[in-house]
Image (spheres, rainbow, N blue to C red):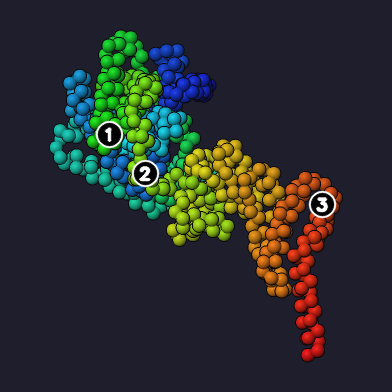
Amino acid sequence: MTSLLFLALIFLLAAVLIVPILKRLGLGEVLGYLVAGLVIGPSALGLVRDAEAVLHFAEIGIVFLLFIIGLELKPSRLRLMRKAVFGFGSLQMLVTWLLLVLGCRWWLGLSIPATIVVSFCLALCSTPLVLHILGERRELNTRHGRLAFAMLLFQDIATIPLLAAIPFLADDALLAAGWEPLLDRILIATCALIGLIAGARYLLRPLFRLAAGSREVFAGASLLVVIGAALLMHLAGLSMALGAFVAGIMLSDTEYRHTIEADIEPFRGLLLGLFFMAIGMTAKVELLFQSPALVLGLTAALLITKMVCMLIAGRLFRASWADSFNLAMLLPQGGEFGFVVLTAAGASALIDQATIELLVLVISLSMAATPVVFLTYVRWLQPLLSPANSASSDREFDTPDNSSPRVIIVGFGRFGQIVGRVLQGLKIPYTVLDNDADRVVVVRRYGNDVYYGDATRPELLEAAGAGHAQLLVLAVSDIESSMRIIEQAQKHFPHLRIFARARNRHQAQLLKNAGIHYFQRELLPASLETSREVLVELGITRDKAQHAVDIFRPHDEQLMSRQLEASNNQKQLIQTVQEAYAELERVYAADEDIVAELERVMRSGHHQVSDSLQE
């Protein structure tokens, strides 16, 4: 027990000290974890000796990563970007893979199955590293930023069938035995996959609805689905990551998607970080000193090959020269999924350990070189290209994408539904969160895009798109929950402008004190409209009745501010209200139009009473 705690302390200490430094240098978290693992591993300080055992345990982080990727791949999102994802993504992968096949076969002398896997592995790029660079430069919404994201998305999808195929490629005995055993294996795998899809379709929604009453039970249900799906595929002879990915896809269109993502994210982050640290621990840095020409030559060859392939793919996809060069300099590295594929290939004995160690080092060096290459390009070469081309756009990307909402509505009762209907009518993308599971089920039957979740959790707001949204509409009836959501939103997403519903005068005072941009007391507009109609029915003309209401509203807002100042003194509060009543009477009495209208109504009313008595 003591040794386990000591190991945990070492991992946490290395991550906390090293990862933020490399992240601040612009090298990304992935490289930070690799370096942290390298420092504490056998090649450096030797604080952790059994790196292989850690790696086997940490592979479950890949299962969680694939589940999250599946969870984010909504069919509607893929339809929106299908041309860029499947067109440009497949084109880039094909061009790069074909060229790398020739290089791996000639330079590394691998078998045909190993060549297929290694070439695919090296064709992958680093999603977190590239998105980090684009995010820092605010280029995610540029043409080359969108194309880069689409390509990375395709690579994430394409990795799944390769991971599923590795056990078949590695099983020489199975292939040598003829078609019958292979067909039996494929049949078993297909039945398991169909069973997983059918079970997910009909059982997952009732499962999560049953667990929705307790946050801890709901988190347990999320872990149950991920681990259960992974084990089912493993028993069928397929990759555990494939099972998690399929389960994520099946849950991507459910109302529980954001809450599940928020529950899984901490486990995914910790285990994936541990996986990359384990990769760093297994990296043989001594190879760089033993064979510097080989290691550096392979790294340079990988960078140059992928730059050329990216440039070719960009031009074939009719991207401008500027965008093609941007992509070439941004995406020449190997990726974190390359470590995943190499680990799976090593576990299946498809690739020997020496080759895996060499390729892990090459991929790591290529990832470390990318920020330097791209920054050099931006400073010296990019200004020579046409700025107009680099800012070019494609109408395909102008369509709003619900995965990046402009508005988040929290609470979808009577108040929130009105806001949602207006936004939907104007085709403004928005996301709705509500913590009433029964209401979510009912509302979704009418075609509304509503998700179950507790918005007081910042990780759930993040999963719902708060990091990119402009507005947060708070339509929650519970005052305490409403104020907790405001506190978390202001702390973690200060850019969000908050528009809130105030259940009563007390909550309005709290919202005003919290500095909310706009809030509406839910009964105030209706009561003022009713007051206006009462005055009209009494004989006051409509414009004069509206004028009286218009005078009352700012007066009431001033009263609320004064009540807020006196909220801790009951005696002073009563005095403030009484003074406000008297002040309102004086304001009305000083308005000549209102006084004249009241006198007219009183005269008209007196004559009506006299006529009634005479009759």
Label at residue 397: 2
Q: CA distance from mark 2 to mark 1?
A: 17 Å
Query: Which numbered disc flags the more N-terminal residue, 2 or 1?
Result: 1
- Is residue 217 placed above or below 521 in the rendered structure? above
Of 112 and 288, nearer the camera is 288
Tell whether label 3 touches label 1 (CB within 8 Å): no
Of 88 and 71, nearer the camera is 88
Secondary element type, mark 2: helix
Secondary element type, mark 1: helix
Where is residue 287 drawn, in percent x and y? 32, 13
Tell whether label 2 touches label 3 (CB within 8 Å): no
Name the outermost residue toward the top. Answer: 290
User: Is there any visible trace of residue 389 in the rendered image?
Assistant: yes
Counting other residues with Cα less than 10 Å from the Cα at mark 3, is it few (<14), some (14-19), or many (20 or more)?
some
Q: Which residue is mark 3?
A: 576
Where is residue 282 drawn, in percent x and y? 37, 19
Secondary element type, mark 3: helix
Of 15 and 101, nearer the camera is 101
Give left or right: position of 202 versus 109. right
Quadrant assignment, res 108: top left
Q: Amino acid under label 1? A: Gly
Which residue is painted at 77% across and 78% down in the image?
605
Q: Which residue is mark 1?
A: 314
Q: Amino acid under label 2? A: Phe
Q: CA distance from mark 3 to mark 2?
A: 56 Å
Which quadrant would the C terminus be assigned to in this image? bottom right
